[in-house]
Image (cartoon, helix red, strand yellow):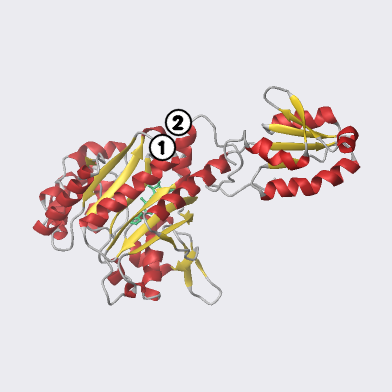
Amino acid sequence: MIRSVKGTRDILPPSSAIWNHVEEQARRVFRAYNYQEIRTPIFEETLVFARGVGEDTDIVTKEMYTFQDRDGASLTLRPECTASVIRAYIEHRLDQQPGLVKLYYMGPMFRRERPQKGRYRQFYQIGAEAIGSESPAVDAEVIELTAEILCAAGLANFELLLNSVGCPACRPQFTSALRDALQDVSKRLCSDCRRRAQTNPLRVLDCKVEADQPVIETLPSILDYLCEACRIHFLKVQEYLRDRAIPFQIRPRLVRGLDYYRRTTFEIVHGALGAQNAVAGGGRYDGLAETLGSKVPAPGIGFSIGEDRLVLALEETQSGGHAPAVDLFIAPLGEAAFRQVAPLARTLRRRGLVVELAPEARLKRALELAHKFGARYALIVGDEELAAGRYALRDMGSGQQRPVAPEELYESVKANVPHA
Ligand code: HAM
């Protein structure tokens, strides 16, 4: 048997209905916050991510699907979308548009991680980027937007973790203090951390190895090293979140696994997810555009929700409700009835009803099928009904049946189905 590749999945019904629900809600909320959709290619020149995400990150060193094209170019399946969005922003001179450029995306990303619950090699993100301002007001709105989408999707009880990772003016002092502190303790850390202590000490704070945590707890906190401008920025973000009654916890070790962050970083975690508990992550990336070759600065902040994890958390915390039920199951009992009701089925579908037209001509079997589909009503059309010009509308809940003229059918069904 040919199976899907390790770390990839088929998203099947009824789960796909939850995915649709999540995406519909996200689009609705994005619209309300005046974000517009961008669709970037699934693959880019490797440079976009190597430079954008950072040469020494786990993503770039270990997790990218990179291949050589036939002409020798090095291409990479996108491991995330922020670098792609900024590449597009520069390429299309979006800086010349008035005001903030507010873009959202949804789609697959690819990272060659070790698959486990909530961690896949092809996974899906719903994300957004607000580009063109350094103001902490934008940080607060972007964080609010992340939370609003999660709420609209139906997620409750998530926690917002917040930090500032400083800027090029203050981070070097912190990095050097960290390096000093690591000299004494790095031999008690995992082999990855011993390497990171040399190459990119900030990454040590991001280590997920359980045994390393007590040592990491003793390392210096970046919040003690923020410059005045970063400190004020961070305080303002907190103030604006409090104004909006958005609860948060400050986590000085939240540096996140991508190198482009400056100042604000945040993550949203949920208890139902187990080890891979981050349902969304984001932060500010002033300077990323310059790293990708832009002459003009493009300070920005954004987030990505892990859609797989959001759906997982919804499935674990909610009981059904998303499977789309059939409004009307039409059971024509024979060829003449079938030919009569087929155009009627199309008319009702055009008006927004969910209609199943059965290919089955036996009444008992058709009603069983109607039950399995969770149909609200069944319409039975046999020779008698055809002759009378009135069809039998059966309420599948009560089992009661009454004759209805074809032209009254839409109103009769619509009155009793939730969505129409
Ligand atoms: P990230 O933290 O790498 O950030 O990913 C964001 C979210 O994507 C994670 O919190 C998680 O829910 C989901 N995710 C990541 N890797 C996997 C995986 N292997 N399987 C399933 N879900 C996964 C970013 O990607 C940044 N681009 C976020 C951002 C946008 N920062 C600024 N703008």
* Residue 284 placement: quadrant: bottom left
Q: Position of residue 129 (x, y in %)?
A: 35, 59
Which residue lies at the image location 41% right of the left edge and 37% below the top edge? 155
Q: Position of residue 223 (x, y in %)?
A: 14, 48
Instruction: Please state, as top left, top right, bottom left or bottom right, where the N terminus lies in the image.
Output: top right
Q: Would residue 353 be found to the left or right of residue 291 on screen? A: right
Q: Nearer the viewer, residue 388 or 64?
A: 388
Q: Which mark is residue 155?
A: 1
Asked if marks 2 and 1 touch (Cβ < 8 Å), the reply is yes
Distance CA(mark 2)–CA(mark 1): 8 Å
Which residue lies at the image location 54% right of the left edge and 33% below the top edge? 321
Q: Amino acid at mark 2?
A: Thr
Q: Mark 2 falls on what kind of element?
A: helix
Which residue ends up furthest to the left in the rendered image? 228
The residue at which mark 2 appears reads as 317
Q: Would residue 370 be found to the left or right of residue 137 on screen? A: right
Which residue lies at the image location 28% right of the left edge and 68% below the top edge? 298
- In the image, residue 381 sits, relative to residue 29, either above or below, namely above
Binning the other alpha carbons within 10 Å of mark 1 as few (below 14), some (14 to 19) or many (20 upward) gives: some
Q: Would residue 210 be found to the left or right of residue 78 on screen? A: left
